[in-house]
Image (spheres, rainbow, N blue to C red):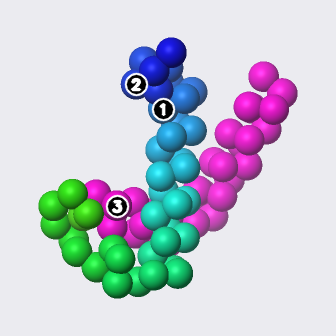
Amino acid sequence: MSALFNFHSFLTVVLLVICTCTYLKMQFPTLLEQKTGFRGFFWKAARIGERLSPWVAAGCFTMGVSIIFF
């Protein structure tokens, strides 16, 4: 089933995008400099990961536990 129609899969994809963009911004800052356009979406995801990192970490942990056990 597509991640668009399954809410659990959609949340997993969103968390993975946020974590990946944050990691890439920390390793390669010039890659996500542009704040508008297509790359602007990834810049915003990286910004969410930077500012809400405790909540994103809790979400990743909860999602991992739910994938393993449920």
- The residue under label 2 is 4
- 42 over 51 or under it: above or below: above
Report helix, strand or loop for mark 1: helix
- Tell me the quarter of the picture where residue 46 sits: bottom left
Determine crowd level at label 2: few under 14, some 14-19, many 20+ residues with C-alpha closer than 10 A: few
- Horizontal side of 7 relative to 57 (left or right) equals left
| Amino acid type, residue under disc 1 in the picture | Phe
Secondary element at tag 3: helix
**Residue 41 position in % (x across, y down):** 28, 57
Q: Is residue 26 magenta?
A: no
Mark on residue 59?
none
Query: Which quarter of the rendering shows the C terminus?
Result: top right
Q: Nearer the viewer, residue 57 or 5?
A: 5
Q: In the picture provided, is 3 more to the left or to the right than 36? A: right
Relative depth, front residue between 51 and 29: 29
Bounds of the magenta span?
Answer: 41-70
In contact (CB < 8 Å): disc 1 and disc 2? yes
Q: Amino acid at mark 2?
A: Leu
Query: At x 15% / y 61%, what residue is drawn?
Result: 37
Residue type of the residue flagged with mark 3 = Phe
45 within the magenta span: yes
Q: Is residue 52 visible?
A: no
Q: Position of residue 30 (x, y in %)?
A: 34, 84
Asked if residue 24 lies left or right of residue 43, the reply is: right
User: How many numbered dots are placed on residues in this image?
Assistant: 3
**Disc 3: which residue:** 42
As measured in the structure, the alpha-carbon distance from the residue carrying label 1 to the one carrying label 2 is 6 Å
Q: Which residue is at a point 45% across and 81% down the rendered structure image?
A: 28
The quarter holding residue 53 reads bottom right
- What is the number of the mark on residue 10? 1
Residue 10 in view here: yes
